[in-house]
Image (cartoon, rainbow, N blue to C red):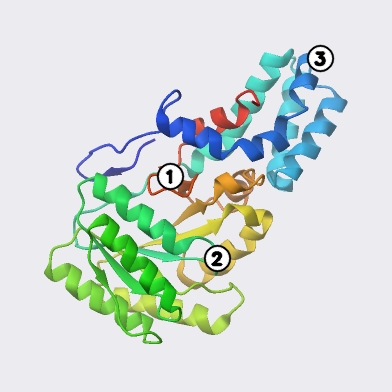
């Protein structure tokens, strides 16, 4: 699937052999090594799905933070296919595993669709400290600029001076305006000012930063709820995308973050950042199996263009490619 607006204009997709796919594959190398570095030989030697293969595969899936629920689902499906004698030989076993993985990830491959009315379309970006939230906003601004959307950024993280400066740097780099106030100001007021400015200027998309917070910090979570209410108060027809940025390196801990943020504001999409720096990329399967929340984007590098719309087929193809 591809990211589209309601004008049906397609966004670039990560196609095998293309530059985006190459970046995705590089970004998944650490996870790939954990999963398959010594399993390919076992696949080759195995005449079918036997207990040794299932035990080894279970170990590797859990090490890659695939999670117990998704791992059990994969193993049970492989065992069922083995009883039907649907899978024998390395190629067939790997194909069966690929099919099962796709069954888990395909339902959360739901592109973010940008509606042009009412303006602006609001993307409220949240996440814990250090998840890569502000950098991801800069990448999102570049992404949507390439779609010929007009963009405005709101510096809603008023608790950290560096966050405002960082966002302003990204704004200058992408040639988009940034609405900001003094440090320590009311975050909700910043968002409200940005909404007014964006509507007056007929901006397509307003991307709002928020203060990084631990999901256990009740006061800050209440502030996030306030920001959500301010958006509705400004225009009850605005339905923001509540995009939660997760550091892929947190692995299974991301599940508790999703739960808390979802209870606070209703998370509508996920962005997995820093996927290139971790061996825990299997967490996507856990997120898909246990939350069902759409995975919108993957961050696979530090450069501005290292952001991709999530494509389940490309993700699994890159993951199961021969380890180099």
Tell me the tag on residue 45. 3
How far is disc 1 from disc 3 in space, using C-alphas? Answer: 37 Å
- Closer to the chain start, of discs 3 and 2, is 3
Report if residue 273 is visible in the image.
yes
Does residue 94 lie above or below 251 as drawn?
above
Q: Nearer the viewer, mark 3 or mark 2?
A: 2
Report if residue 233 is visible in the image.
no
Q: Residue at x 50, y 41 (%)?
A: 107
Q: Give residue 73's position: percent from left, percent from top.
A: 70, 38
Q: Residue at x 33, y 36 (%)?
A: 12
Secondary structure under badge 1? loop
Pick the residue in front: 6 or 249. 249
- Closer to the chain start, of discs 1 and 2, is 2
Q: Give residue 179's position: percent from left, percent from top.
A: 26, 73
Q: Residue at x 54, y 33 (%)?
A: 25
Tell me the tag on residue 116. none
How far is disc 3 from disc 2 in space, using C-alphas? Answer: 43 Å
Pick the residue in front: 126 or 300. 300
Q: Give residue 307's position: percent from left, percent from top.
A: 42, 46
- Closer to the chain start, of discs 1 and 3, is 3
How far is disc 1 from disc 2 in space, using C-alphas? Answer: 18 Å
């Amino acid at each position: 699937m591809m990211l589209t607006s309601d004008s049906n204009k397609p966004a670039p997709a990560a196609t095998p052999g293309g530059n985006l796919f190459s970046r995705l594959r590089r970004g998944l190398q650490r996870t790939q090594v954990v999963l398959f570095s010594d399993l390919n030989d076992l696949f080759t030697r195995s005449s079918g799905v036997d207990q040794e293969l299932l035990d080894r595969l279970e170990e590797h899936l859990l090490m890659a933070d695939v999670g117990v629920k998704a791992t059990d689902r994969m193993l049970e499906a492989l065992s069922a296919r083995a009883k039907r004698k649907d899978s024998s030989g390395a190629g067939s076993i790997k194909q069966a595993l690929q099919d099962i993985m796709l069954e888990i990830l395909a339902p959360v491959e739901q592109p973010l669709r940008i509606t042009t009315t009412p303006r602006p379309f609001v993307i409220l970006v949240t996440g814990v400290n250090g998840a890569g939230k502000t950098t991801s906003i800069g990448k999102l601004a570049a992404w949507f600029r390439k779609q010929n959307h007009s963009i405005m950024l709101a510096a809603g993280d008023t608790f950290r001076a560096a966050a405002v400066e960082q966002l302003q740097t990204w704004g200058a780099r992408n040639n988009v305006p940034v609405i900001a106030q003094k440090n320590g100001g009311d975050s909700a007021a910043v968002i409200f000012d940005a909404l007014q400015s964006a509507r007056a200027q007929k901006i397509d998309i307003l991307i709002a930063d928020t203060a990084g917070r631990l999901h256990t910090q009740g006061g800050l979570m209440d502030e996030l709820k306030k920001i959500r209410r301010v958006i509705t108060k400004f225009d009850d027809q605005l339905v923001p995308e509540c995009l939660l940025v997760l550091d892929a390196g947190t692995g299974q801990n991301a599940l508790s973050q999703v739960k808390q943020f979802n209870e606070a504001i209703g998370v509508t999409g996920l962005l997995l950042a820093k996927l290139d720096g971790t061996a825990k990329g299997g967490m996507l399967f856990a997120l898909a199996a246990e939350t069902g929340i759409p995975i919108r984007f993957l961050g696979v590098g530090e450069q501005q263009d290292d952001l991709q719309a999530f494509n389940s087929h490309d993700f699994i193809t890159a993951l199961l490619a021969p380890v180099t």
